[in-house]
Amino acid sequence: MAARLRPLLALLALAALCPQETLAQPLPTTDTWKSEGQVVDSYEASAQLCWADYKEHMDLLEKDWCNWTVISRPYSALRDCLEVEAEVFSLGFPNPLAERVIFETHQLHFSNCSLEQPTLCDPPEDVLLAMIIAPICLIPFFVTLVVWRSKGTELKT
């Protein structure tokens, strides 16, 4: 058993004493901060192009912006464009800029939309009483029926 563990312990000690260079991350420099800023600026420019394309599509549509079947295609295209551009620049999605663009979209185009749901109310009292009393009255009948049928099968066996 100890012979099996010896190579593993040696490998573990080697890994602890000599960390792999590929796993070590370099410290950020001013050049890396500048390049990250350029990436964000480039993504922002691409996001503005996505927004302009979306706005052009929405302006061509009727003002029935609360109907999902009308606006689903341009809205999905905007989201897909923002996601693809984020992948191009190796940014995660959703990201703060994409969220801001989508939030602006909702403020501009969908601020007057609300879910139209009928208000639910209780049924009239006589219907409610019938719905409550019917099962209560049927329970003793079904219990009696089950007991009667089970006694009938016991006598046959």
Image (spheres, grey):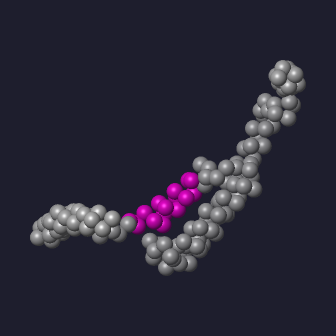
Residue 113 horizontal/vertical position (percent): 40, 67
Residue depicted at x 87% and y 22%: 3
Horizontal and vertical percent for residue 16? 82, 22
- Name above or below for residue 51 compared with residue 89: below
Q: Residue at x 74, y 43 (%)?
A: 36
Of residues 121 and 131, the one nearer the viewer is 131
Looking at the rendering, the stretch of residues picked out in magenta corresponds to: 99-114
- Our reading of the magenta stretch's main secondary structure is helix
Q: Quadrant of residue 45?
A: bottom right
Q: Position of residue 82 (x, y in %)?
A: 65, 59
Q: In the rendering, at what x and y percent does residue 97 appear?
A: 61, 51
Based on the displayed image, in which of its 4 quarters is residue 58 positioned? bottom right
Question: Does 113 appear in magenta?
Answer: yes
Q: Nearer the viewer, residue 96 or 142?
A: 142
Task: Write down the quadrant of residue 59 in the picture.
Answer: bottom right
Q: Indicate the quadrant containing the C terminus: top left, top right, bottom left or bottom right.
A: bottom left
